[in-house]
Structures are given as C-alpha cells and as structure tokens.
Image (spheres, rainbow, N blue to C red):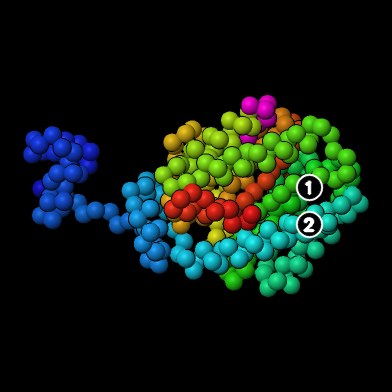
Amino acid sequence: MTTKLGRNDPCWCGSGAKYKKCHLAADRAAGRAPAAPEAPRSPTLDAEWRSAARGIRRRTRRIRLKSEAEIDGIRRACQLTRDILDRLGDVVREGVATGAVDRWIHETMREHGATPATLGYRGYPASSCISINEVVCHGIPGERELVSGDIVNVDVTSILDGYYGDASRMYLVEEVSEEARRLVEVTLECLDLGVAAVAPGQTLGDIGHAIQRHAEAHGFSVVRQMVGHGVGVEFHEPPEVPHFGEPGEGPALVPGMTFTIEPMINAGGWELEILKDGWTAVTSDGSLSAQWEHTVLVTPDGVDVLTA
Ligand code: MF3
Ligand code: CO
Ligand code: CO
C-alpha cells in the first residue's frame, strides 16, 4: 500500500507530529510512500550554495541553477553588455539614425568576440532593440533620426562564449519634457526596487509587487504582456518574471538563478499593441513608455547585479 498522507498532515501513528517529521522516511524505506522527488540541481554548485538552496525550491523545478563556471561566463557577457550601454551615452545623440546606433552596437560586439543575441532571433532583423517614446519595447532600428525630446530605450544582449548578458537603459535626447524625465526616473527606481527584493527565499511575486507598487503610486502603469525572464545559458529561459504581483506569490528565488528584471512602465494605461512589422510594441493610448533592464544573479546572501 502507498500512503496518500500529505507531508504536513498529522502522522498516521497518532504522535501528533507532521508526517514528514515522523514516519515518512520509514515508509519510504519500506516502499509504503512514493520516493522523494528528485531535486534538480547543478552538480558543480559549491556546498554553501547548495545548502542555501535547500528547502526553498518551491515551484522552481524547471528553473536552471547555474554552476560557478556558467556564472563566470554569464558575468563576462553581462559586463560586455554593460560596457556597450556605457559607451552608448556618446552614440545616442540628436540627429543620429537608430540604424546607425544599431550598426555601432553590432561592430562593437564583434570587436569583442561576441554576437548580438537578437539578430535572427525568431526572425528579428537587428542587433539591438531601440524603442522611442510611445514604443514600449522591440523597436526595430532603422531610418528614424533622434530628435530633441525623445526618450530612447536601447536593449542589448551579447552572446560571449555561448553565454548571454541582457540589459537596457534609457537615454534622453537634449531637452526632454518634465513628464518624460519623471517617467524615466520612476522606472529606474522600479528596477532598483525590484533588484532590492531579490534574496533567497523571497519570491518572484515580491519583485513584481515592489515594482507595481512604486509605479502605481506615481500614477503610472505596469505593462502586463511583456515580462522579464531567466537568461544566461539561453536567451529566454524559465521563469517568467512579471513586473506586477503579490508578495509571497510565485516561485521562490534560489541561489544560482539568473534572470532579468526589466520593468516597462507607461505614463498612461498598460495596454499595448504590436505594429504590422510583428515586433514593435506601442502603448495603445499613445502615452510614453520607459524601460530599464538588468541581469541579476541570486546569491546566498542576496543579489549580484551582473550588468551593473
Ligand atoms: N532583449 C530583449 C529582452 O529583454 C529581447 C528582445 S527579443 C527581440 O528580453 F527579438 F526582440 F530582439
Ligand atoms: Co530581457
Ligand atoms: Co533585453
């Protein structure tokens, strides 16, 4: 016979203790209870990280924990992405076409032995995403020249030695309206609050909640259809990382997880539409949208922002 008792039910022996603390192990040994599920793990994670992960692997089974070697590689890809975003401060200027910015990104990545993850990804035609004003994300670089007042997100993902580093920032072109500046600032604060919510035993819901609360307190809205994602060994891995949510909900964070936090915050409503090119996402009401993105690593004592 196989018992159907839950791990937290009172043990069948009448001791009053929870089943998992009492006869579960003995029943398993005797074949009366199903074997313990195999916990997925990274065999090369060191003991300290494994012990920090123990007990908080709730709803996390599809999420890949990275080995130390993988983390080193992801960190290098993230640092290249960070360096490119730093240097873009001088490239993203009034009068420059977004296509020229994209070519600069492509060449700079190649010079460093990396390739742009977006190029050819599900048919995407460019080496970056450049999203201006009411464009929420996935803007395709092209002829459009930057003009004073534009708020511009440039999203860069490098693949270096097979590892992915994904980040984006906002760039302000010359004189920007007070509302636009405020939106960009609050969105950066949302990212920082999301990052600050990362620690082992916290959940994805804690991250989303911190972001949503701050955005909505300022009268802005959080985009729902686009979310952050696991990243590192592939471009988009489990889990999805919503930028809204309830504290304590969703998968728990475990040391060795790497994922992005990339809130898209709109000055108006959260709804968006995809243009006929199949990529460009714009706010349905034409309001401004801003986004900042980091790739982060969950560590035994908190978070390491790999693209910082
Ligand atoms: N870098 C984007 C992200 O943050 C993904 C762009 S996918 C593309 O996830 F195909 F649109 F480039
Ligand atoms: Co991303
Ligand atoms: Co990105």
Is the C-beta separation of discs 1 and 2 under 8 Å? yes
Task: Give the side of residue 109 with respect to residue 73, left or right.
Answer: right
Q: How many marks?
A: 2
Foreground: 305 or 273? 305
Which is more N-terminal, label 2 or label 1?
Answer: 2
Mark sitting on residue 171: 1
Question: The disc labelled 1 sits on which kind of residue?
Answer: Tyr
SS type, badge 2: helix
Residue at the location (46% across, 50% down)?
301
Q: Where is residue 196 shown, x and y percent of the image?
A: 55, 42
Residue at the location (28% across, 54% down)?
37
Which residue bears the numbered disc 2?
Answer: 88
Question: The disc labelled 2 sits on which kind of residue?
Answer: Leu
Tell me where the magenta segment starts and ends, as one range. Answer: 217-222
SS type, badge 1: strand
74 drawn magenta: no
The reply to whether residue 20 is visible in this rendering is: yes
- Mark pair 1, 2: CA separation: 9 Å
